[in-house]
Amino acid sequence: CVADVTGHGIPAALGSVILKTVLQSAVEHHADPGQILFYVNQRLIVLLPDQFVSIFIGRWNSTTTRFDYASAGHEPGLVLTLNGGPYPLNATGPLLGITDAAVWETEAVELRDGERILLTTDGVAEAIAPDSRLFGRAFLADVAADALTLPPEEAVRSIHGAVREHQAGEPPTDDLTIVILESRPNPRAFN
């Protein structure tokens, strides 16, 4: 799960704590990512009436390499394949906190060994250079694809380094979260 609560400072921090608490309760009741988002949204409408949340949540089945996900208006995830360009995992419903009638579809993607999913917050694609250019989703996809042969930890450092280089010493204007999930063989799947 990668999420971003609107605002900055203490209100956003308190919203994050509430989100985490509600999310922990949701996963005790539901396994389907879309149902988890519905559960969380119903509670956030009451608990955070003046805030919105973007969130990307997934469930990994290591035996089948299936990744089920739902996204509430969050920055698209990227599937990094071994034999083709990255492709996005777009939002499957609106931001949390807008309406209690909202629903989120659960989508699925199958990964082969060595393929990855990249999740970020909007602070990565919206990182600003001194000349006001955004880092951008297209450049993020290129940098992530170039780092596909690196171990996941090094790939995260490489992407973060590219963002910092783009900012040329300017401080970030938003949080930068970068998560890489990699499909690896599961020896128990063959027992």
Image (cartoon, grey):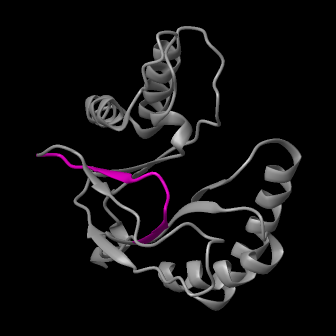
Residue 104 vs 134, above or below: the answer is below
Identify the magenta region: 69-83
Residue 87 vs 55, above or below: the answer is above
Q: Quadrant of residue 99?
A: bottom right
Q: Quadrant of the N terminus?
A: bottom right
Q: Is residue 141 left or right of residue 61?
A: left
Q: Please name the residue shown 85% across and 52% down the image.
A: 11
The reply to whether the magenta stretch includes residue 99 is no
Q: Please name the residue shown 59% across and 88% down the image.
A: 30
Q: Is residue 116 left or right of residue 172?
A: left
Foreground of the two, 80 or 140: 140
Q: Please name the residue shown 49% across and 15% down the image.
A: 129
Foreground of the two, 87 or 116: 87
Counting labels gives 0
**What x and y, as percent, mark residue 104?**
46, 79
**What x and y, as percent, mark residue 31?**
53, 85
The reply to whether the magenta stretch includes residue 72 is yes
Q: Quadrant of residue 68?
A: bottom left
Foreground of the two, 88 or 152: 88
Q: Quadrant of residue 187?
A: bottom left
Q: Is residue 173 left or right of residue 129?
A: right
**What x and y, as percent, mark residue 86?**
23, 46
- The residue sitting at the bottom extreme is 29
Q: Quadrant of the C terminus?
A: bottom left
- The residue sitting at the left extreme is 83
**What x and y, as percent, mark residue 153?**
48, 36
Q: Is residue 16 left or right of residue 30?
A: right
Residue 173 vs 22, above or below: the answer is above
The reply to whether residue 1 is visible in this rendering is no
The reply to whether residue 4 is visible in this rendering is yes
